[in-house]
Amino acid sequence: MSLKKFVDKNISVIMTVLAFASLLIVWELISRFTKAGLFLPPASLILEKFIVSFKEPIGKYTMLTHIGVSLYRVGVAFGLSTVFGIALGVSMGYSKLAEAILKPIFEFIRPIPPLAWIPMSILWFGLGDKSKFFIIFLGCFCFITVNTYEGTKNVDKTLIGAARMLGASERQVFFDIVLPSSVPYIFAGLQIAVTAGWSAVVGAEMVHSNEGVGWLIVMGMTYGKTVQIMVGMLAIGLVGFVLATGMAKLERRLCAWNNQGM
């Protein structure tokens, strides 16, 4: 393969690498040669501490354990929000009665940020993982519900009418037409929700936690450890990028029929 063909084939990857490299170089220069270095540690130091954290513990655990604990919390909450979000979104989108009853309540709760629920989560679920699951659940739930609702509402009404005219039962209409047509919207909601849930883990781990990437940031803030804060931010950014990329690839694989039709 010629160099030109290689560049053309991998142009997006090359541009991404160049963008990040440029950012790190600018960051390093600003930190080393301006007064910003008083509150902005060099990029090289952050990267060094991040790599070292996989061998040397921060608190009781190494970085791999902190990331694993946070992923576990996000995974449980994301799974629950997927089940309840899809169920609620489909119900409101398919049934006018359910929409009339549930949508006003959902729209009332939807603008409240997950962090605002922290005091109530402690009262309801205590200081353990249940309260953390609840906060992350809220961070994912609304995105999944809204996208599922929009997908269900946007199903071609002509197609539904034709199916009913041909004698299809409501069960057949729902499972053979409504639900498959909503799948691309659902996956769009899942892709947003998984990154939103990963972001919400910082707030969730403010609640009496001894591990997790959110805990790294909270403890760094408490003790004025700027490097630890930025190491935690780097971990969140990298894992969030991997989660979003993985979900996008999963969507392309499972919804290949939809991409081909575009």
Image: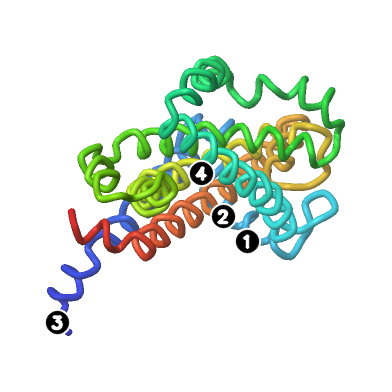
Residue under circle 2? 47
Spatial distance from mark 3 to mark 4, Cα to Cα?
37 Å
Note whether residue 23 is visible: no
- Residue 80: give x, y in percent of width and height: 64, 45
Mark 2 touches mark 3? (CB < 8 Å): no
The residue carrying pointer 3 sits among few (fewer than 14), some (14 to 19) or many (20 or more) residues within 10 Å by Cα, namely few
Mark 2 touches mark 4? (CB < 8 Å): no
Residue positioned 82% across, 49% down in the render:
59
Q: Quadrant of the N terminus?
A: bottom left
Residue under circle 3? 2
Using the rendered view, name the quadrant where residue 63 is placed: bottom right
13 to 202, vertically: above or below: below
Q: Earlier in the sequence, mark 2 or mark 3?
A: 3
Instruction: Assign a secondary structure to mark 1.
Output: helix
Task: Answer left or right for 31 relative to 75.
Answer: left
Spatial distance from mark 1 to mark 3, Cα to Cα?
35 Å
**Which mark, residue 51?**
1
Mark 4 touches mark 1? (CB < 8 Å): no
Task: Answer left or right for 192 relative to 140.
Answer: left
Residue positioned 24% across, 44% down in the render:
165
Give the residue type that dot 2 points to. Leu
Spatial distance from mark 4 to mark 1, Cα to Cα?
23 Å
**Which mark, residue 195?**
4
Spatial distance from mark 1 to mark 2, Cα to Cα?
6 Å
Q: Earlier in the sequence, mark 4 or mark 1?
A: 1
Instruction: Assign a secondary structure to mark 3.
Output: loop
Give the mark toward the camera: 4 or 1. 4
